[in-house]
């Protein structure tokens, strides 16, 4: 038996030597690799790559920017069932081992010795954390050993729960989803706590091979992997046999979910993205920034609706452009029809469709995915053929005059009143023939007390045209600019009752390149006209004579107070008709002064910026109106910067009053349907109806709407601001003013009310039909008096020379 004893001693010696050699090898490896191992003391404060989020003021999602989808979660927010699923799939002994599964590594080593092939396995969750945060995914012995050492370090520094939190937020799960929070959103459109067992197991099966086991790209293998995870959960006692069987029987319910946009404001999103990139460069898309904008979700939705309705209505008024394309022959079967529609995106709310049948007074169109739309005669009879912006063809008599099978068209869903015989009085849905508008539009709304942007629409559809007409389109404002001209006139001593002659005139002005013969929009002349009446009816010739009387330079000096650069404005009489080139942004800024009592505020869009782990890193400090603050005060009682007063309170009050009359009895009387006494505004139309505007406000909100062609084409005969743009403003204000107190401005000190003769503008003692009350600055009340019924006038107090001829 001596040989057995010798054999035992030899084996024991070899084992000891092997252990010593192994220890020496491990020590040598650690000594060699340790200088290159990264420190792990920052793991607790690790900043994951989180996309940029843009939110409304109340936290609704507007947009998300960044290649990686990630929704970081605290460990307490991760359901226990999700943790159990990942442990079952990846590391069943996680809570028991020290960061390294030696048995797993031994199995992988034996496999390598027997086959000569490296086998995947032996990596614990902690080792995966080490690899994902610090090392490359390259499969080498050096990296594996480094991974082991780092895992041991991590286990020494962090709790098991902290390690799991890092892992479940960092792991790549396919389709740009990083972490379980993002995966739940990407594949199921849910939060992690809303997932069922089968969905949870599906996500837990992804780390091994996010593409091969993906439910969207490889459903059969994804089901196999899911069922494997469910089987392991049953073996480990996490779920019962019945729970396992029910989950295994579930079909795949995954689909590709984009971030759920709650507020449609893509032009706003792009403005914010550009600003964030300017501030933070590429880190803007990965740094975990959340931008809270000043946008009000309810206002924004109303603005979108207003612009689209106005452009759809304009488009229909000018006739049907015809089908986008005619498919010959008509594709047969839903699959062929779906293929024909595949590359045609929705524009605004206009869906692409293919006409499949045309009857006498109706048509049927295929919408895709087996859906059809029946278009009744009431919803297509508008489609007279488009000829020019001023001309349409004959009215159609039957559906075939408009549509043919195979036509690729657009339809939109509308609400209509039920038929006369219907007992149901509620509006019902119908499909209406539509077309992508060729004209463009924009709408901007501000809170005048501090300039906060409450709604912004830069066009009909951002994905059709990214050109932001609110900030980038320099257009002539037309008569909308008269508000600033008339404010300048009041500052130069004119009054709402001042008379200016509305009569033909010819100007030979070198700066206007020859003789200029301006006209009123109506082509008529009305003789001596009070300024209130001239602004209300938008009399061009009065505005021109008014500007000439006060002087262009005087006017420009005053207009600069509204935020316009005089160097960028015309220095001639065409300024009176709005010949400058301005953006809706600039116009809204100017009108905010008329709305808020005479204070200049700067429009702003970003309320605050937050960063994951850092909290608020930026907060806007807009200059804010403070009526109670003494002149020169820099900060109000709440510490906010005080907006400077730029026009006298009395000037603003007079302008507000005159512009209320624009709605009450002037060029914007359609707005009376809103039923508000506190709204004021001014229409604007440029030569040949190339631009249509409405700028309107009350004391708490100012909004402007613009309609026109990007190439400056004519809108067409009759397309004035009150017809083309005002409806968009009204659709917006109808929603925005709902619940807002009706509050007219208080009369400031130094304003008096005087009875005047409406024909002459001078005070009168008569109470006859020609008399009316007018408001004046106390020092500008005319002293001339018209006798009872005389209609005459005599010398007045010193005042500007009135341009009566």
Image: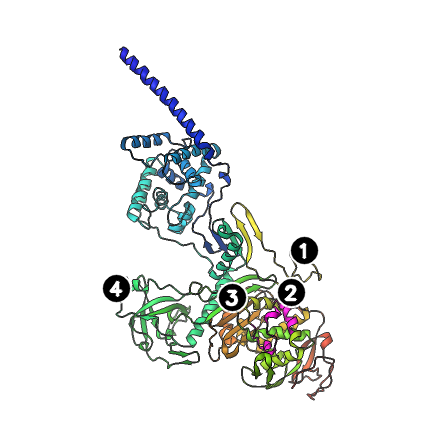
| Location of mark 4 (residue) | 333
- Front-most of 526 and 666? 526
| Location of mark 1 (residue) | 637
Disc 3 packing (10 Å; few <14; some 14–19; many ≥20): few
Where disc 4 sits, the SS reads loop
* 367 sits left or right of 311 in the view: left
| Location of mark 3 (residue) | 472
Q: Earlier in the sequence, mark 2 or mark 4?
A: 4
Residue 66 belongs to magenta span: no
- Between the residue at mark 2 and the residue at mark 4, the CA separation in whole angstroms equals 64 Å
| Location of mark 2 (residue) | 599
Relative to residue 524, is residue 619 depicted above or below? Answer: above
Q: Earlier in the sequence, mark 1 or mark 3?
A: 3
Select label 1 or label 3 by which is in front: 3
Where disc 2 sits, the SS reads loop
Q: Which residues are magenta?
A: 555-580
Quadrant placement of the N terminus:
top left
Select label 3 or label 4 by which is in front: 3
Q: Earlier in the sequence, mark 3 or mark 2?
A: 3
- Between the residue at mark 1 and the residue at mark 3, the CA separation in whole angstroms equals 37 Å
Mark identifier at residue 576: none
Q: Earlier in the sequence, mark 3 or mark 4?
A: 4
Q: Residue at x 31, y 43 (%)?
A: 225
């Amino acid at each position: 038996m001596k040989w057995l004893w010798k054999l035992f001693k030899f084996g024991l010696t070899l084992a000891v030597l092997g252990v010593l050699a192994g220890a020496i090898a491990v020590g040598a490896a650690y000594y060699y690799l340790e200088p290159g191992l990264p420190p792990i003391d920052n793991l607790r404060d690790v900043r994951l790559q989180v996309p940029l989020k843009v939110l409304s003021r109340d936290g609704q999602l507007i947009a998300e920017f960044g290649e990686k989808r990630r929704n970081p979660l605290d460990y307490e927010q991760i359901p226990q069932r999700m943790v159990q699923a990942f442990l079952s799939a990846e590391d069943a002994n996680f809570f028991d081992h020290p960061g390294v599964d030696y048995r797993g590594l031994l199995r992988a080593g034996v496999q390598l010795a027997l086959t000569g092939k490296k086998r995947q396995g032996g990596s614990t969750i902690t080792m995966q954390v080490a690899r994902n945060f610090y090392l490359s995914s390259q499969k080498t012995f050096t990296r594996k050993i480094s991974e082991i050492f780092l895992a041991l370090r991590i286990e020494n520094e962090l709790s098991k729960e902290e390690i799991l939190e890092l892992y479940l937020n960092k792991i790549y799960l396919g389709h740009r989803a990083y972490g379980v929070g993002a995966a739940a959103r990407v594949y199921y459109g849910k939060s992690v706590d809303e997932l069922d067992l089968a969905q949870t197991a599906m996500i837990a099966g992804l780390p091994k091979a996010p593409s091969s086991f993906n439910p969207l790209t490889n459903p059969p293998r994804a089901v196999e992997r899911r069922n494997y995870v469910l089987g392991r959960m049953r073996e480990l006692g996490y779920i019962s046999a019945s729970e396992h069987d029910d989950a295994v029987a579930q079909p795949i319910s995954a689909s590709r979910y984009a971030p759920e946009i709650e507020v449609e404001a893509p032009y706003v999103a792009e403005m914010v993205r550009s600003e964030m990139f300017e501030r933070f460069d590429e880190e803007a898309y990965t740094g975990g920034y959340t931008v809270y904008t000043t946008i009000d979700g309810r206002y924004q939705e109303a603005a979108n609706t207003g612009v689209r309705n106005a452009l759809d209505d304009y488009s229909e008024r000018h006739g049907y452009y015809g089908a986008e394309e005619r498919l010959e022959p008509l594709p047969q079967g839903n699959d062929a029809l779906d293929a024909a529609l595949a590359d045609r995106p929705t524009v605004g709310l206009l869906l692409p469709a293919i006409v499949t049948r045309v009857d006498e007074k109706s048509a049927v169109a295929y919408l895709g995915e087996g859906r059809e739309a029946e278009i009744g005669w009431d919803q297509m009879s508008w489609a007279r053929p488009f000829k020019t912006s001023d001309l349409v063809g004959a009215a159609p008599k039957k559906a075939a005059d408009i549509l043919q099978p195979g036509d690729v068209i657009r339809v939109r869903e509308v609400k209509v009143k039920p038929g006369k015989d219907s007992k149901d009085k509620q509006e019902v849905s119908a499909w209406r023939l539509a077309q992508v508008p060729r004209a463009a539009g924009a709408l901007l709304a501000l809170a005048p007390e501090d300039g906060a942007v409450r709604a912004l629409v830069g066009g009909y559809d951002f994905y059709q045209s990214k050109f932001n007409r609110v900030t980038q389109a320099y257009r002539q404002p037309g008569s909308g600019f008269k508000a600033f001209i008339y404010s300048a006139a009041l500052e130069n001593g004119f009054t709402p009752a001042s008379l200016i002659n509305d009569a033909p005139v010819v100007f030979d002005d070198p700066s206007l390149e020859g003789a200029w013969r301006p006209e009123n929009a109506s082509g008529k002349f009305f003789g001596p006209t009070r300024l209130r009446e001239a602004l209300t009816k938008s009399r061009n010739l009065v505005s021109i004579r008014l500007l000439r009387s006060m002087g262009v330079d005087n006017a420009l000096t005053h207009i600069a107070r509204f935020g316009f650069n005089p160097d960028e404005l015309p220095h001639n009489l065409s300024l009176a008709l709005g010949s400058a080139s301005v953006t809706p942004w600039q116009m809204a800024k100017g009108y905010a002064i008329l709305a808020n009592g005479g204070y200049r505020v700067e429009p702003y869009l970003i309320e605050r910026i937050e960063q994951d782990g850092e909290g608020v890193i930026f907060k806007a400090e807009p200059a804010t109106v403070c009526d109670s603050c003494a002149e020169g005060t820099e900060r109000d009682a709440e510490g906010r910067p005080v907006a400077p007063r730029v026009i006298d309170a009395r000037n603003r009050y007079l302008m507000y009053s005159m512009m209320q009359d624009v709605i009450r009895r002037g060029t914007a009387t359609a707005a009376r349907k809103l039923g508000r006494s506190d709204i004021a505004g001014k229409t604007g139309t440029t030569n040949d109806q190339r631009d249509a505007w409405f700028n309107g406000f009350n004391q708490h909100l100012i909004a402007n709407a613009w309609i026109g062609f990007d190439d400056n084409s004519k809108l067409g005969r009759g397309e004035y601001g009150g017809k083309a743009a005002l409806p968009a403003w009204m659709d917006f204000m109808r929603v925005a003013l709902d619940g807002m107190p009706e509050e007219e401005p208080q009369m400031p000190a130094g304003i008096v009310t005087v009875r005047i003769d409406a024909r002459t503008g001078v005070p009168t003692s008569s109470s006859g039909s020609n008399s009316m009350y007018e408001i004046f600055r106390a020092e500008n009340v005319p002293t001339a008096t018209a006798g009872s019924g005389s209609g005459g006038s005599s010398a007045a107090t010193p005042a500007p020379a009135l341009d009566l001829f």
